[in-house]
């Protein structure tokens, strides 16, 4: 790929923006009915303004909030280890102990930086975009030195970002357009040479904002970065270059719920439920109008020259004059049926909650659930989100950890660790990721229990140490509480050395076969004469 120029960046930005145009009206409709507080694509509005005036049914916004919160809890739970680093299949067995120790330490450092950053806050905003419009973008930057965390995250609104698929099928090419004042522009790009007319214009109007285009484009094993000031392009001059650089991993992480073949942007559960959401909203609107008619009523009157409907006020104690023999005011019966609208509305709300997984991931109606019900509920959740989780694992979780390791490597906080799948591998430990591993562990335990009925020869097929280590890994047991192979060998050697001493102690003390080893040991330690006898009998055996 040839070297990028500011003009190339703006041309590619316009092309990506034109491709995104067909999605904008669809996204805006999803936001209006499911996430009304998110700024729109066609009018940004003012901060703090009401944006839910046209929304009459709150089922969809509530289900979106629950689904986004569930995604955060099941994929990237705050204050919990949702990932880990482990040795790969080609790691040197002789260095396995030291490698695992370094990887555990690096995992703890990574987790600490994530917890001290604003990751959970911005990640939740991204999940809201993900379940509403099917695509989201997270900006992962390195924080300034001296901050509590080396990481800084920003949930980029889709109104600012254009994403394109690269060769790998990931959203690797990203363009972001943001408008910032001159002071922020100078602070963010201090090395940029700004035009003189731009600064003079800012002196006259301090509220003016300038459009900045940031582009991250995949170029082989690296990502080229360029920030361009859009001022002057297309008429009066060339665009102004603000910054140029390269990244080993893209700071923009774009991810999708699911996608259709041939499309770059994702599809969301809200899009699937949008017909029901719009219908439920209309049903509630018509029901409210019918209710207002039922309260105030619709009246008809004869035009007899005496009754003037324009002067009538329907308040208690009102006397309405009418001509002799005329009907006066006559109520008109409403044709609407509240019962039918409630039946239709309840069915629509049920389908909306089902499409947005509120009935699967939300809080169960029954507070007391058996262990079997909990397992079945978790298994069903893993089955429903299996495909989505596989995509999020590739497009979100792996780039997050790889980018985090790159930042800490540059800072020198980890020792050149790189996830390659051969020597260092990434292990996912979120509740949703461990569900499948736990299912495998349960199958193995059931198989071991079945072997018990076949006798000791069948049980002899099992390697106890390897089985215990696999189960520990499946249930997320910290590896530092397990004995290493070297420690197990030392314990076995110590036991073989202590065996003659215990046998001799049994002979010296006259202990019967029914006495336990622990009782014999306590008896020897309590009597100094017995201890001396045992030491003489042991000779040169080292304890």
Image (cartoon, rainbow, N blue to C red):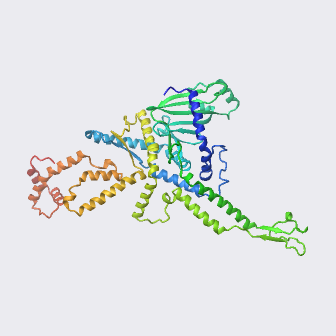
- Residue 473 to residue 254: above or below: below
Identify the image quadrant of residue 214.
top right
In this rendering, the answer to whether 479 lies above or below 175 is below
* Residue 425 horizontal/vertical position (percent): 36, 42
Q: Residue furthest front?
A: 262
Q: Left or right: where does residue 35 sit relative to residue 200?
A: left
Reply above or below: 1 against 390: above
> 315 or 71, which lies in front?
71
Q: Residue at x 26, y 41 (%)?
A: 93
Instruction: Pick whichever, 532 or 430, lies toward us.
Output: 430
Q: Position of residue 172 (x, y in %)?
A: 49, 37
* Nearer the observer, 241 or 326: 326
Q: How many marks?
A: 0
Taking the image as shown, residue 405 lies to the left or right of residue 187, namely left
Which residue is situated farthest in the bottom direction here? 325
> Would residue 78 be seen by someone viewing this image from the given angle?
no
Q: Is residue 209 visible?
A: yes
**Residue in the image at 27% along x and 61% along y:** 449
């Amino acid at each position: 790929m040839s070297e990028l120029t500011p003009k190339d960046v703006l041309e590619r930005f316009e092309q990506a923006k034109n491709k995104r145009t067909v999605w904008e009206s669809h996204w805006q409709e999803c936001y209006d009915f499911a996430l009304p507080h998110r700024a729109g694509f066609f009018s940004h509005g003012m901060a703090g303004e009401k944006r839910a005036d046209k929304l009459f049914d709150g089922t969809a916004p509530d289900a979106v909030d629950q689904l986004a919160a569930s995604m955060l809890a099941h994929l990237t739970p705050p204050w919990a280890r949702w990932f880990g680093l482990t040795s790969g299949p080609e790691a040197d067995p002789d260095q396995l102990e030291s490698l695992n120790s370094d990887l555990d330490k690096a995992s703890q450092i990574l987790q600490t930086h994530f917890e001290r950053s604003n990751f959970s806050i911005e990640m939740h905003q991204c999940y809201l975009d993900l379940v509403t419009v099917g695509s989201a973008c997270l900006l992962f930057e390195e924080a300034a030195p001296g901050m509590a965390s080396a990481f800084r995250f920003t949930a980029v609104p889709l109104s600012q970002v254009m994403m394109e698929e690269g060769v790998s099928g990931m959203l690797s090419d990203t363009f972001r357009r943001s408008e910032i004042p001159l002071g922020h522009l100078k602070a963010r790009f201090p090395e940029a040479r700004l035009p003189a007319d731009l600064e003079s214009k800012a002196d006259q109007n301090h509220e003016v904002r300038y459009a900045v285009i940031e582009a991250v484009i995949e170029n082989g094993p690296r990502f080229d970065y360029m920030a361009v000031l859009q001022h002057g392009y297309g008429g009066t001059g060339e665009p102004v270059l603000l910054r140029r650089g390269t990244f080993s991993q893209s700071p923009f992480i774009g991810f999708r719920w699911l996608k259709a073949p041939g499309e770059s942007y994702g599809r969301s559960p809200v899009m699937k439920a949008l017909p029901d959401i719009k219908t439920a909203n209309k049903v509630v609107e018509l029901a409210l109008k019918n209710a207002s008619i039922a309260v105030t009523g619709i009246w008809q009157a004869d035009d007899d020259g005496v009754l003037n409907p324009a002067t009538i006020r329907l308040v208690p104690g009102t006397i309405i004059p009418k001509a002799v023999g005329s009907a006066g005011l006559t109520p008109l019966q409403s044709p609407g049926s509240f019962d039918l609208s409630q039946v239709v509305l309840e069915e629509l709300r049920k389908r909306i909650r089902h499409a947005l997984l509120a009935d699967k991931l939300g809080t169960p109606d029954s507070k007391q659930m058996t262990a079997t019900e909990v397992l079945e509920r978790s298994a069903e959740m893993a089955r429903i989100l299996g495909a989505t989780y596989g995509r999020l694992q590739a497009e979100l979780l792996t780039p997050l950890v790889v980018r985090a390791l790159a930042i800490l490597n540059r800072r020198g906080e980890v020792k050149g660790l790189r996830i390659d799948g051969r020597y260092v591998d990434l292990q996912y430990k979120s509740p949703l990721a461990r569900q499948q591993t736990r299912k495998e562990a349960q199958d193995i335990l059931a198989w071991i229990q079945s072997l018990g009925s076949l006798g000791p020869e069948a049980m002899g097929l099992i390697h106890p140490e390897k089985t215990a280590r696999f189960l520990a890994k499946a249930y997320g047991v910290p590896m530092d509480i397990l004995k290493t192979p070297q420690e197990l060998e030392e314990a076995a050697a110590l036991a073989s050395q202590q065996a003659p001493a215990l046998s001799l102690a049994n002979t010296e003390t006259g202990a019967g076969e029914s006495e336990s080893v622990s009782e014999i040991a306590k008896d020897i330690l309590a009597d100094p004469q017995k201890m001396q006898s045992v030491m003489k009998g042991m000779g040169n055996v080292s304890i």
